[in-house]
Image (spheres, helix red, strand yellow):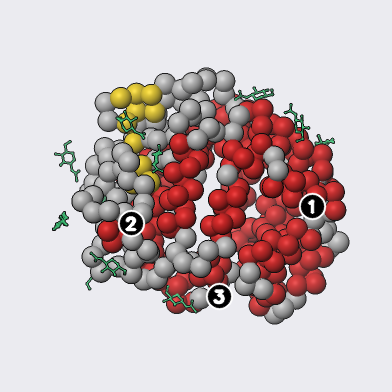
Amino acid sequence: MRASTSIVALATVASYAAAQTTSIASAATAALSLLSPNCQATILQLATNSSAAQCLHVDLLAGLVTSNGSLIPGVDNYLSTICSSAPCTNETLTNTTQTVLQACSSDLTNFGITNQTLEYAMELYPLAREVLCLKTSDPYTSANATMPMSANSTMSSNSTSSYNTTNGTFCATSLLTEFSSYLGTDLTTSYVTSVALGGNATALQTIESIPLSALCNECVFAALDLVEEELPFIGNISVMNTTLNGFLDGQCNSTNLTVSTNGTLPTNVTISAVNSTFTYNITAGNVTYAPNSTVLPAVAQAASSNSSALLAAATSLTSGNATSSLASAATSIVAGNSTAMKRRWIGEQ
Ligand SMILES: *[C@@H]1O[C@H](CO)[C@@H](O)[C@H](O)[C@H]1NC(C)=O
Ligand SMILES: *[C@@H]1O[C@H](CO)[C@@H](O)[C@H](O)[C@H]1NC(C)=O
Ligand SMILES: *[C@@H]1O[C@H](CO)[C@@H](O)[C@H](O)[C@H]1NC(C)=O
Ligand SMILES: *[C@@H]1O[C@H](CO)[C@@H](O)[C@H](O)[C@H]1NC(C)=O
Ligand SMILES: *[C@@H]1O[C@H](CO)[C@@H](O)[C@H](O)[C@H]1NC(C)=O
Ligand SMILES: *[C@@H]1O[C@H](CO)[C@@H](O)[C@H](O)[C@H]1NC(C)=O
Ligand SMILES: *[C@@H]1O[C@H](CO)[C@@H](O)[C@H](O)[C@H]1NC(C)=O
Ligand SMILES: *[C@@H]1O[C@H](CO)[C@@H](O)[C@H](O)[C@H]1NC(C)=O
Ligand SMILES: *[C@@H]1O[C@H](CO)[C@@H](O)[C@H](O)[C@H]1NC(C)=O
Ligand SMILES: *[C@@H]1O[C@H](CO)[C@@H](O)[C@H](O)[C@H]1NC(C)=O
Ligand SMILES: *[C@@H]1O[C@H](CO)[C@@H](O)[C@H](O)[C@H]1NC(C)=O
Ligand SMILES: *[C@@H]1O[C@H](CO)[C@@H](O)[C@H](O)[C@H]1NC(C)=O
């Protein structure tokens, strides 16, 4: 199964990060070393010296993952930058995609990633930026939580803060702070890595015990509103005998939250991405923002015509097959069987 292959490969990279080093720099080196030389060189060049690196502000991201403290202030700063500076142009995105397709053709085949999958994924950039730049005037607050740096002062509007609070707090900052509070700890790079690799059973139990009502959050609904505007089929994915939208609307029926699929955001949420390239209307409060361009990306056209390939790709990600591959990958990692993992990655078995 294609999706499973990619997940196994990703888990392999993660296993290098976990088993051989705690340093992100050497984990990145380990990940790169699994790629063909030509692909490696191209990725390095794209990440360090390209118009894509500039518009994605890769330098800030690199600084973020190498910091020691909570990731949240760095994420907030990163969002301030990408939301207020020029977005990646369509030309940069398509050029980058073609460059990767050419240099990493055999690597992508081994991953089970088709040209079209990568092209679709890159087309989701305007949506991703729009979602990341959502802001809320009603951010998460908690008196008793273990807060990341400055969060206690940030979340009250009357004090100084190291977070961006111009026209609201970033939804991502608010949600990450809430998550951090449930876990009772700062979200540092090493903590997030260890939890993601299943290395902290306590944390996994805590995550499972988070009530579903935590989903009844304006920021969560706002993000979904935008995602479903471009990819309506997401709302029809089955969740517990119903659709995702039916499930959320039911879970949250004691609030006024319902999933809109026309870009109408919940009361306290606004947009902040400058020069947005998202191609749909967005309504925040009583203002409707029209898109700067209405040329729909191919992925949106495929979604609106209910392309079975797109649906199958999305479904396979949530299928039991992918999950069990992940579990078996994790088991191999725990058993230290990284040679076998590497062989699977490079397609020898
Ligand atoms: C805060 O974020 C907004 C976007 O919401 C941006 O326009 C502004 O420049 C940012 N302010 C700072 C100080 O980074
Ligand atoms: C695409 O990227 C390559 C390598 O960075 C560059 O040489 C080329 O001019 C770019 N093409 C366009 C159309 O931007
Ligand atoms: C994928 O893209 C590469 C680079 O443009 C090309 O050489 C290759 O033929 C494409 N594969 C398919 C199946 O279209
Ligand atoms: C805050 O403390 C109260 C009472 O001690 C507890 O019930 C609640 O779960 C705590 N909230 C969080 C987010 O940990
Ligand atoms: C905010 O958190 C810092 C660090 O935990 C603490 O020193 C400070 O007293 C807190 N401020 C308030 C107002 O709670
Ligand atoms: C900030 O606002 C809170 C209530 O929102 C209030 O309790 C607190 O005294 C205020 N602090 C300052 C320094 O004004
Ligand atoms: C804040 O919101 C106001 C009103 O919507 C808008 O005019 C202003 O440009 C926004 N500021 C930033 C930095 O986005
Ligand atoms: C595991 O997670 C718990 C809960 O988030 C945290 O308190 C603890 O410090 C973590 N343990 C390690 C070794 O990181
Ligand atoms: C889903 O449907 C099955 C069979 O109809 C039922 O046994 C189960 O309880 C339902 N689950 C939920 C979460 O409603
Ligand atoms: C919300 O849904 C639950 C389960 O379907 C139902 O029992 C409850 O009455 C509903 N509450 C409201 C306010 O509609
Ligand atoms: C839900 O909406 C009604 C009418 O618009 C309003 O009176 C009520 O306060 C809202 N409830 C919540 C929890 O926002
Ligand atoms: C982006 O550029 C490509 C190639 O020039 C073009 O086919 C496509 O329609 C453009 N997409 C958007 C959303 O403008």
- Residue that appears at 52% across and 28% down: 277
The mark nearer the N terminus, 2 or 1, is 1
Give above or below for 335 relative to 120.
below
Relative image position of residue 287 (x, y in whole percent): 30, 25
Does the Cβ of the disc 3 residue fall within 8 Å of ligand 8?
yes
Give neighbour class at mark 3: few <14, some 14-19, many 20+ (Cα, 10 Å).
Answer: some
Tell me which label, 1 or 3, sits earlier in the chain.
1
Q: Position of residue 79 (x, y in %)?
A: 46, 45
| Residue 310 in view | no
Comes first in the chain, label 2 or label 3? 3
Q: Which residue lies at the image location 72% right of the left edge and 32% below the top edge? A: 95
Residue type, label 1: Gln
| Kind of element beneath mark 1 | helix
Residue at 82%, 59% (x, y): give it: 346
**Quadrant field for ligand 8:** bottom left
> In this figure, which residue is indicated by the disc labeled 1?
40
* Residue named by callout 3: 199
